[in-house]
Structure formats: C-alpha cells, structure tokens
Image (cartoon, rainbow, N blue to C red):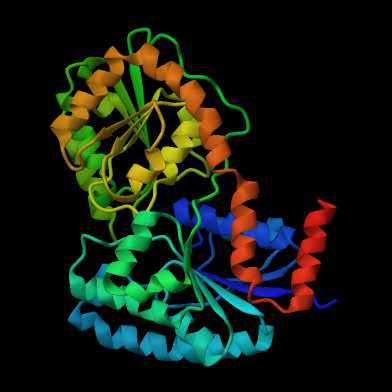
Amino acid sequence: MAQPRILVVHPSAELYGSDRVLLESVTGFLAHGAHVDVVLAAGGPLQAQIEARGASVTIESMPVLRKSMLRPRALPALLAAHVSGLVRGIRLVRQLRPSVVYVSTLTIPLWNAVARLARVPLVVHVHEAERSAGRLLRAGLVAPLRLASLIVFNSRYAQATVEMDYPRASAKSRVVYNGVVGPATTTPARRSLDGGLRLVYVGRLSARKGPDVLVEAMARARHSEMLTLTLIGAVFAGYERFEQQLRARIAELGLTNRVRLEGFQPSGYPYLAEGDVAVVPSTIDEPFGNTAVEAMLAARPAIVSDTSGLREAGAGYGSVVFVPPADADALAAAIDHTVDEWATLAERARVDADRAEERHALSAYNAQMWAAVQRFLPAVSQRRGLAVVAEK
C-alpha cells in the first residue's frame, strides 16, 4: 500500500500556543500511518520536537505576515519575497509529492498559492481572529482562504470572525478545539495561602498579551503586599523595547523583588505547580486560549480576560474569574477576590482539571484532525489509516 504523505507548513519554530498545537497535529498524522514532511521558516526548539516524533523537517525561508511588514515602505520587499518563495515552494511540493498540504495559521498565505498552483488539496488551520483589526486588513488576511479545500478553526469565535469577511467559508470549514498536553503529574492547589498569593503569567511578552496590565494590577490590588509574580515568556525579535519598558515600570512600582522574569521556557507547568493562580490578561482578540486551558489542566484557578476566544477556552469552569480586558483596576479587584475566596476556588480547580482533560484530550484532537485531512488522501491511504487505528 502507498503510504499517505502530508506536507505541513508552519511559520515558527518556537514552543508557544500554535507551535504546540502544530506539534500535536503532526503527532496525530504520524500515528495514523502518514509520512509527514514539515517546512519551518527557521530552526528552533520546535524542530527537535518534531523530528523526535518521527517527521522530517526542512528549513525554508518564507515571508511571514506581521503588522510591521504591511506598511507601504515594506511592501516591495514583501512582494519580492513572495515571488521567490513561490518558486521555491512549488519546486519543493513537486519534489515531495504530498497528497495534501496542511498550512498552519493565516500568516503564511504564500503556501496557499503554492498548493493551488501545484494542484494539491489545501487544508488551512486558522489560529488567528483579528476582529479588532481594520476591515481592509481583515479582508487581506482572509482572502487567501478562498484557495483552501478545507478550513479548520480552533474556536467558533475565530470562525465567526473570518465569516465576517468571507461568509462562504462556512461551507468548507469545521471547528476543532485545540488538544492540549497536560502536566506529567498534577499538584493540587494549596488549600491555604499562608500569607502569600503567587501569580503566574505564561505567554509572549507583548502589549496585546497584557503582562504590563498585570504588573499595574499587582501594584493596585488591596492585597498587593502579599503578591508575587512570575512572568514566563519572551518578546518577538525586534520588540525588545517592550521588555525594557516593562522592567522599568516594575522598578518604578517598587516590585523588582516580587516579580521574576524567567524568559522563554519549554513548559509553563513547573511554574504553575509552584504558583497559585494563572493570569491570562490579553488586551485584544484571542482566537482561543491555550494558557487558560493549561491552568485548568494544572488544577490552578485562573483570571482570564473576558473577550473573544478566551471566553470559549474558559467557559464551563468554576475556578475561572473573567475580567474586562486592558483594565488594571478590574484585574486588581479580581486578584483580591481570588485571595478572599481562595478555599472555594482552589477546590473548584481540582474538579476543573478533570473536565479540561476530557474536553481537550489529545486522542480526540488527533482523530478530528486526521478526519480533516483524510478526505483528501487516496482511498488506499484511508484504508491504511483505519488499519493503524484498529491496531492501536
């Protein structure tokens, strides 16, 4: 039997939310008997993880859409990068001869064109939801989805956002909630705070993720003196100024001895196990919220911005406290509420851990993602995939 071959393309080689979801997609494809080739825009920790699972990795320079690249001065270089990337991409597809191309995220539309020109079915996995962006920018990001054979969204919010500019997307789309890896062992939250509350933030250091709002809230909270904060994450290259400003503000507020910046870490779970509360203070749209789910899997109460896909990620959990985004006073009040109601929230978090494990089980995610690509594989490959599942 011919082995099904899937070409996976992803713009990052780090280990943040969409990177980890990509890793689980690859793992699921491999588990169903497919040969998986992965193209990354650069080397990084994700590459080693993918190769350890059994897929091959090719590093191929590709233009990745970022807001800084959409300025008039940057457009000529962006266009040139797309033209040269298109030629290289088509050459690679013809060399590998995949049955389907799976493109992760909206930020590499070049590969949508590559798949279409190479006449290979295209599955696009959407992890973004830029509803707060201008209409013209949204339309530009969504336009390449018209080339997709199937669109997978990680939340209903992301799907609805795309359909604002591309209503016909509903006819060729499905929603698959992220599969999220839990901690190796779950340490229950402390029953008593014993005089201190340990806050944990896991994510990019950027204005849109809100760590600066969290620092302000920490200083304003009624229980401020009993709070400590650990920040896990780093800035995008070129945005180092944000971290410099954040450190300066921490010093101005007199919090230097109570705030730790640990930089990027392979996993946030060890820090959640040491901490008490996860805070997800995003200031603008989020398509989903892996970090909120990770808090639940770690049996930790969470304070989460009440916006966009974060509502879906935190819905149905008794230990989640929602707050208006970008509101330091409201976040401070939520932190104080968590201190005051600690015993109740800690107990609810124990229950929520089981609920999160069931809702975001990797086995269910892998089965749904395999079903998404399987329809584009040769019939003989589909039978092979079913045989692999039966054996397991």
Residue placed at 51% from the left, 78% from the top? 149
347, above or below 159, in the image: above
Residue 126: x and y, percent? 43, 64
Of residues 124 and 8, which is closer to you in this image? 124
Residue 155: x and y, percent? 41, 54
- Identify the image quadrant of residue 171: bottom left
The answer to whether residue 13 is seen in the rendering is yes
74, above or below 232, in the image: below
The answer to whether residue 236 is seen in the rendering is no
Residue placed at 73% from the left, 68% from the top? 34
Would you say 10 lies left or right of 307 here? right
Residue placed at 32% from the left, 52% from the top? 286
Residue 180: x and y, percent? 54, 45
Of residues 226 and 283, which is closer to you in this image? 283
186, above or below 261, in the image: above
368, above or below 322, in the image: below
Q: Residue furthest front?
A: 171
Residue placed at 70% from the left, 75% from the top? 5
Q: How many marks do you count on the picture?
A: 0
- Identify the image quadrant of residue 291: top left
Residue 388: x and y, percent? 80, 60
What quarter of the picture does the N terminus occupy?
Answer: bottom right
